[in-house]
Amino acid sequence: DVKVTQSSRYLVKRTGEKVFLECVQDMDHENMFWYRQDPGLGLRLIYFSYDVKMKEKGDIPEGYSVSREKKERFSLILESASTNQTSMYLCASTSLGGLEWYNEQFFGPGTRLTVL
Amino acid sequence: AQSVSQHNHHVILSEAASLELGCNYSYGGTVNLFWYVQYPGQHLQLLLKYFSGDPLVKGIKGFEAEFIKSKFSFNLRKPSVQWSDTAEYFCAVNGYSGNTPLVFGKGTRLSVIA
């Protein structure tokens, strides 16, 4: 079974703090993604990565950065957390290869971040 | 830019009623289409997907979806819902060629009452 794990299910931080959200997948997937999920807005892509040390901006990258030093790990960083970053953060991964590059995205359980 | 539109924000059905959730997409080329489901407190998981071939796609738990290219639609259906189908449903799309991320709709919350 593919497993995508996220470091915390719930996190409470204060405005201005630096926040790290970690995601690890165990299936040697090339592609990894960070989304935020908000009621009525669905999932919005923050950043994604096709390979180690590679990153691409998604639709809402402002206020976020990412790091991918190892293939299995993709970190989302909030440099200075703000209240409008209170949200559910979802990590996903998928494989890349041959005709099946569009394989299913596998999601982690999510981290519910509250910024006070 | 790609976009996905889900027509219903919240749908309430009685058990055994039939379900159809609308999904329309905007994209200038060949697409891959997906429906994901999120049960309360659980991960997002794939219900079904369409890449090519038969436009009527069958997924898990009795769900199916029909791709109608002329209408840019990919509606989700189930002939008889159960209480356990209560969940949030997301339609998603990405481009057929290239390594592009999924674009998700805003989701439809389904509540099934006994």
Image (cartoon, coloured by chain):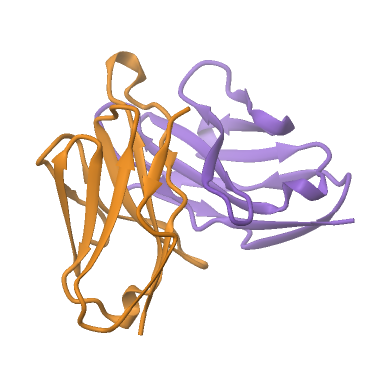
Chain colours: A orange, B purple
The residue positioned 29% from the left and 29% from the top of the image is A29
The residue positioned 24% from the left and 30% from the top of the image is A30
The residue positioned 28% from the left and 40% from the top of the image is A32
The residue positioned 46% from the left and 23% from the top of the image is B51
Q: Residue furthest front?
A: A7
Q: In this picture, is A101 found above or below A77?
A: above
Residue B1 visible (yes or no): no
Q: Position of residue B87 (x, y in %)?
A: 66, 53
Q: Residue furthest left?
A: A53
Q: In this picture, is A86 found above or below A75?
A: below
Q: Position of residue B64 (x, y in %)?
A: 67, 31
**Foreground pick, B66 / A20:** A20
Horizontally, residue B108 falls left or right of residue B69, namely: right
Q: Position of residue A85 (x, y in %)?
A: 32, 73
Q: Which quadrant of the figure has residue B40?
A: bottom right
**Foreground pick, B62 / A9:** A9
Q: Which quadrant of the figure has residue A69?
A: top left
